[in-house]
Image (cartoon, rainbow, N blue to C red):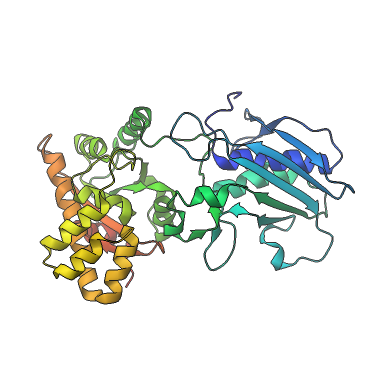
Amino acid sequence: MSETKGLTLPIWVVAAACAATQVLLDQPFTSSQRIYLPGDANNAEPLYVPVTSSAMFAGGSQAIAINHCEPGLGLDLTRGLEIWTCVQWQQNSLDRSLGDELEAWLYLVAGAGVGTLEGSGEACLSGFARQLLIRNLRPLIPLGRILRLEIIFPRGKELAARTSNKAFGVVDGLALIGTQAETQDSASPQQLQKTLDQLRCKSADFPIDIPLTFVLGENGLDLALKLGINSDQILKVGNWLGPLLVAAAEEGVGKLLLFGYHGKLVKLAGGIFHTHHHLADARLEVITALAVNEGLPLHLVKELAQSDSLENAFLRLESRDPDVAKRLWNHMALAIEKRSADYVRRYGSWTIQVGVALFDRQRQLRWAGPFGQRQLSFWDINLAV
């Protein structure tokens, strides 16, 4: 594959890391890096990924490579993101302060602008990104040597402020959480068609008594797998939830679980079934209306409406009255299930049970509607207290 556009951030980072390591090994700078994907056979066709530049520091003990991310045509804030990868041989004994130990041969350091997990300070790195490093960087490291790799995104912290990273406990920069090589524009019609094709393929022989789980986003996918939902029972979806709900009903899916962050799925409670923030963002308005319907005191309703985010609204209400907060969030889950069922009935009379399960910024599964709780019980998954 020679096409280099539309690749996820981990691909561009690993290409730069390989280029810097080659220079450290006194090899010529290669502006087009061959990158192999995890799980591919040794004879699989690689990606050819460009690297902007690479050079040795004075003294010859460190090297740096610079790259620029090209995520394709969709709306993506990593477009043009400058990437620095700094490498050197680690001479001392292993020291945990150097960063996250990826393997015995590599220490990965989250430099400026790279997102870290709140509390631990470790680089936020997906399994795909880790395996990508192992597949491509490990063969370059001489036996017995330890490479210290520091990744830096000069504008990472600034750009991360525009994302929901902090809502998931990722601070100080952009996370390396891609799960595949090619980017996906979750708001594009092409992505909708691709997901519809995956849905039809998955639902062809899907057991009627097992819930099919729609997960939203990388964090939703990661949490669902960790909780024990089988990958064969999961479909990662984008923002076109309305058409996908109807398609699932058309394909004969009997039970469907919507699994995602409350700040995304709350839009369904307001009848918004395309959830990209460029199209509609009425989360606080929706939760305020739900609070009125639930009969919350006027002063609490006003506080919700004046919050700067749904997560802060939740935290504020929970600190004031945990029982009221739980009642409101359960009401939200019920409203999502009801509006989803109403949406499907608008287009046909299929029999489908739509449940919802919601997690918070700590990635704790906190709330579920009546159908959602029944479906979670299939995997013996309990809500966090």
Position in image of residue 161 (x %, y %): 47, 52
Which residue occupies 40% across, 58% down? 228
Q: Residue furthest right?
A: 59
Is residue 68 or residue 176 the one in the foreground? Answer: 68
- Looking at the image, residue 164 sits to the left or right of residue 257; the answer is right
Which image quarter is the C terminus in? bottom left
Is residue 351 or residue 164 the one in the foreground? Answer: 164
Which image quarter is the N terminus in? top right
Which residue occupies 17% across, 62% down? 291
User: Vertical placement of 289 versus 202: above or below?
Assistant: below
User: Vertical placement of 98 versus 18: above or below?
Assistant: below
- Looking at the image, residue 10 sits to the left or right of residue 333; the answer is right
Which residue occupies 20% across, 53% down? 286
Position in image of residue 304 (x %, y %): 24, 63
Is residue 367 or residue 82 the one in the foreground? Answer: 82
- Looking at the image, residue 123 sits to the left or right of residue 85; the answer is left
Which residue occupies 56% across, 33% down? 70
Position in image of residue 206 (x %, y %): 29, 41
Can residue 126 be seen in the rendering of this structure? no
- Looking at the image, residue 96 sits to the left or right of residue 60; the answer is left
User: Vertical placement of 234 versus 182: above or below?
Assistant: below
